[in-house]
Amino acid sequence: MKHRITEQTFYKYLKCPSWISRELERDEDLREKLLEKIQDDGLLSEHEKALLTDRDYVEVTSDDLDEAALQTLELMKKGAQTIYKGILIHENWVGRPDILERVEGKSRLGDYYYVACDIKRSRHMKDEYKFQGLFYAKILDRVQGHEPVMGYVLHADGNVESYLLEEFDTHFHLTMDAIEEILDGGSESHFLTSGCKQSPYFSECELEARNCDDLSRLNRIWRSEVDLMMRVGITSVEELANAPVQNLKEVHGMSLDRLYFLQQQAIAMSENKVIRIGEIELPKEEGPVLVVDVESDPLRNSDYLIGVLLIDNGKETYHPFLAKRPEDEEKAWHEFTEFITHYPTANMYHYGWYEVDVFRRLTERYGAPEEAKRIIENQMLDLLSFMRQKVIFPMSFYSLKDIAKYLGFKWRMNEASGLDSVLWYEEWLENGDTKALEDIVNYNEDDVRATWLVRNWAVEDNRR
């Protein structure tokens, strides 16, 4: 019997091809349904339905895939305008679009056909969305005798975004061929990327890359760059670290500057040392300083905690602005913006782009004092962007967890992640577990303190 292919198969392949083969070995998906929903950029059912209030929709409710597919087909034959949570099946292909919408046209169904639309919390179109949309279109062609030309995504803000399916057709078929080869027992050469972190088998991927001393261990290296280096016999991190300049010059298709930079990464990794290639240009702080970190619930498209570490006159105090319920988000936001206006000259440190994106979104949603807007626009400092081109760590990934742990910071819950924070929040909302709420706050406090440690290390490193 052929293994079933779903829209999630594309997500797994695009994140880490080894995910599919490892999952086949165990014959099960290790993820909880909640985690699958988070990784699929979906929302909880009640929030999805809130986006459909102006539509006359019919929901497919059966938990059995085959029965749900029959229900969906019957609704399509009857000409239902909007079908929510329908199931499309053709041979071993199983598609689960959030919405099937009837439009005018010709098909085996009559003077209409259906197009598929997924509900996604992200405000940005992603490649995996387009692959999934084209997958639905291919099944719809088999089911209704008409292949849609457009795919659609309904974003959490209520906006519908369309895209032309044929632009991804060639890439889709190449990807499908690769997936089917893996399902038939083949394999694809392993390549460690940040996407592998989404897989429940990430530790196995990382161990395999380390044991092979694979070039993909280098931070942000492209597969095409690895291919170019392998053509001239540079096949491992150690070989790149020890490669003479003449060998690097034989690598065609890459600039020498890029090759030198990658070689410095290889040296740092081989010798387990930090290499500084320039001064980290952070400001000298003389007054109060703020460090921020956000915890968000992607299932509800809400941000439930903004943690702030205030450093003032050598004293560090942590301030959590917590929305105990999603409806408290606005209140927590206004308390945060009011707080930062008391420190108009303070720089506000964070790690990565996420906090800036959240603050701009919340400002659009709820507004903010002009002073708070000014601070957010002008005084937020992303530590990662300051450090990335100036210092090389012996690490495959430069996340806060990776870098701060390397520098000696210890989280109270060592293996916890942002995903755990989301799951704790769900536990709090569902069961009123105050321990879960306490864990969220402690985890966030550790994040801002870790960020401050990295900032202080960067400043001290400049003085060496």
Image: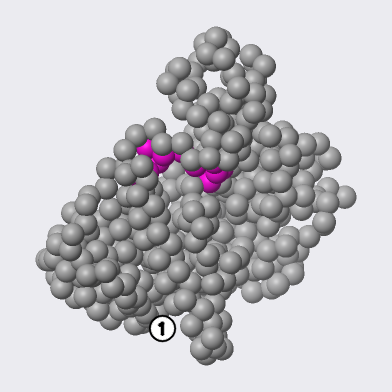
One can see residue 112 in this view? no
The residue sitting at the front extreme is: 464
Q: Nearer the viewer, residue 334 or 2?
A: 334
Q: Identify residue for label 1.
A: 325
One can see residue 35 in this view? yes
Instruction: Give the x, y percent position of residue 14.
Output: 60, 43
Q: Amino acid at mark 1?
A: Arg
Which residue appears at 47% of the width and 23% of the height?
260
Magenta residue span: 385-397
Q: Main secondary structure of the magenta part?
A: loop
The residue sitting at the right extreme is: 1
Instruction: Give the x, y percent position of residue 25.
Output: 83, 51
Q: Residues within 10 Å of mark 1 (few under 14, many from 20)?
A: few
In the displayed structure, 406 sits above or below 138; it is below
Q: Quadrant of the C terminus?
A: top left
Picture quadrant of residue 100: bottom right
Q: Nearer the viewer, residue 361 or 271?
A: 271
Q: Secondary structure at mark 1?
A: loop
Instruction: Give the x, y percent position of residue 61.
Output: 64, 74
Which residue appears at 51% of the width and 79% of the height?
439
Picture quadrant of residue 444: bottom left
Which residue appears at 43% of the width and 57% of the height?
122
Q: How many numbered badges does the structure rendering display?
A: 1
Left or right for 95, reference 151: right
Left or right for 330, reference 430: left
